[in-house]
Amino acid sequence: MAERRILLEHLDVPNAHTLDVWRAHGGYASLDSLFAKEPAAWVDEVKASGLCGRGGAGFPTGMKWSFLAKGTGKPTYLVVNCDESEPGTCHDRQLVSRLPHLLVEGIICTCWAIDAHHAFIYIRGEYAYGAERLEAAIAEANAAGLLGQTINGREFPLRITVHRGAGAYICGEETALLSSLEGDKGQPRQKPPFPAVAGLYAAPTIVNNVQTICSIPYIVKHGAAWFAGINLEPESKSPGPRIVSVSGHVQRPGVYEIENGTPFRELIYDICGGMLPGRDLKAVIPGGSSMPMLPKDVILNTTTSFESIRAAGSQPGSGAIIVMDDSTSIPHAIWRIAKFYAHESCGKCTPCREGNPWTVKILGRIIAGQGDPRDLAILDDIAETMEKNSFCPLGIAAAWALQGGLKHFRHEFEALCQG
Amino acid sequence: MLSDAARAEILAHRERYPEGRQKSAVMGALHIAQAELGWLSPEVFREVGELLSLAPVHVAAVATFYTMYEKEPAGQHVIDVCCNISCMLRGAYEILEHIEQRLGIKRGETTADGQITIREQECIGSCSTAPALQVNYRFHENLTIEKVDAILDQLLAGQPVASPEEVTHG
Ligand SMILES: Cc1cc2nc3c(=O)[nH]c(=O)nc-3n(C[C@H](O)[C@H](O)[C@H](O)COP(=O)(O)O)c2cc1C
Ligand code: SF4
Ligand code: FES
């Protein structure tokens, strides 16, 4: 079993970020099919493809588009989420820095389908290079008549604005992102209303992940059935090529594109070359640090389909696969993850604002060998409070990460709490 | 004080957003101001507020929410070492400690000559090429102690350090 490169097919082509090279490799060919169909037909096509959002929640993309409020008298906006700050996740960065025209092409297709004439790309501030690459691609596309008043001669005004973030993980959450894009502090908003009804500037808005939007030109070019067929598990409802970031203790960490349903065993041992010399697999976080980790015996019987990961007790999340070998102290790993959530809590609600720093403090003394046997019950309690009472998914994610460690590796925490 | 060029850049940046939505330009304006001045003083909040018709307290509230905006002068060069989970698994703390030792300062501090600040950073999106750091928000990946030493040698000699990613991608 190997990689199957579709979105990443031209990743290693020199100068694939330029319009000429992108076009020489079939770039913008989707536009030939795009205008042949009415927008509504494309929404149905994307629905039929089975594409699920790649940003974290895995919501079906076509269905999300069909929820857009109609007849509001307000413009519709597309917002592309390139905040990519979930620990372990680094593939959107490759897309925007090395294949920026693919994203522009995806934006054109999507805006036609949802009838939007202004798209925003919210890119995390640390991706200065990615932002430069995007700006250059947009400028090229404008000069070539692919954006502006007409697209390839077809009357369809469209502009793209790149908006740089400035260091805040919470801005990846779609409502916080919209607040940030509007020029406020990036704090989450109450849902409903969902962005499709009242999003950016209270207008109907679609927020989609970079990889989600980069998938659209392939659906336009090859059709829903082709996309749905990229699936090793015919019963799975999350078909398509999927780009994952593999990190941690494998021989060849990297950004890989695989078919839905590729077993973790093959991903880790074949595609990534297996574990580091002399080491054995211990645990894997299958969807970014926000998702519960799974121990070796579970992950090796799991595939990358959304259904399989969920049945195993975790989530596909952002597609960040973090591999840990038997040299890893799980309490230490969980402490580092908790430190991240404590740092990134936006402070709006108490369970998350207070729960995370307390978790870090307690885990800190546990890994220093000064834990108390009662500490684990306190951690369970904090996690439950955060999971049940946080205002947004960040607090819930922090709870899940902690609970995953406590559930599968409790003995390691207990061993450190013996005094 | 912002230069005329920076003020013009901010006014041009405002045009990226729909009519009447100039508040959206505040983050970009702060990036432009910081690129010129190195950090954001209350004076800058007032100036940016004036250019975008926003209350200075609003500009300040935004600036203090995000970590990349410097609220006090940082070093000429900022080294952000990611120590989040994927990098930690690949030896990030050893890298950070090595830099601390060589520069004789701790994370969060700036060298006495004001040249270099080092920080422990959260995930910067290089997890598959860990450990990684950024120098002035430009990537350096698959780090080894030797690579880090080469970066520090260049910085200490006052030479520019190019991000390998930006060189090899052409
Ligand atoms: C704390 C938090 C951080 C998130 N960060 C990102 C992110 O960096 N990129 C992203 O696409 N989605 C992120 N999401 C998910 C978004 O809220 C949203 O579901 C997604 O952008 C929708 O796009 P999709 O349907 O194409 O997946 C995050 C969610 C939460 C709760
Ligand atoms: S859970 Fe509450 S404090 Fe934490 S990020 Fe969400 S809104 Fe902010
Ligand atoms: S964890 Fe270090 S770059 Fe992601």
Image (cartoon, coloured by chain):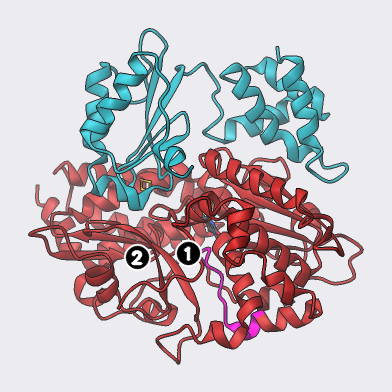
Chain colours: A red, B cyan
x, y percentage for residue B36?
62, 19
Majority SS type along the magenta span: loop
A365 left or right of A105?
left
Q: Residue at x 59, y 30 (%)?
A: B64
Residue A8's label in the rendered image is 1
Residue sitting nearer the eye, B156 or A341: B156
Q: Amino acid at mark 2?
A: Pro
Instruction: Indicate whether residue A360 is drawn in magenta.
Output: no
A126 left or right of A213?
left
x, y percentage for residue B59?
70, 29
Q: Which residues are magenta?
A: A46-56
* Circle 1 SS class: loop
Q: Residue at x 70, y 22 (%)?
A: B45
Q: Residue at x 56, y 29 (%)?
A: B69
B150 left or right of A65?
left
Comparing labels 2 and 1, the label whose residue is closer to the camera: 1
x, y percentage for residue A42?
73, 79
Q: Give the labeled residue for mark 2.
A: A292
Relative to B132, is A308 above or below?
below
Q: Dot 2: within a 10 Å radius of its alpha carbon, few (fewer than 14), some, or many (20 or more) residues?
A: many
Of all chains, the one bearing label 2 is A
- Outermost residue on the top side: it is B113
* Circle 2 SS class: loop
Q: Dot 1: within a 10 Å radius of its alpha carbon, few (fewer than 14), some, or many (20 or more) residues?
A: many
Q: Is residue B54 visible?
A: no
Relative to A152, is A371 above or below?
above
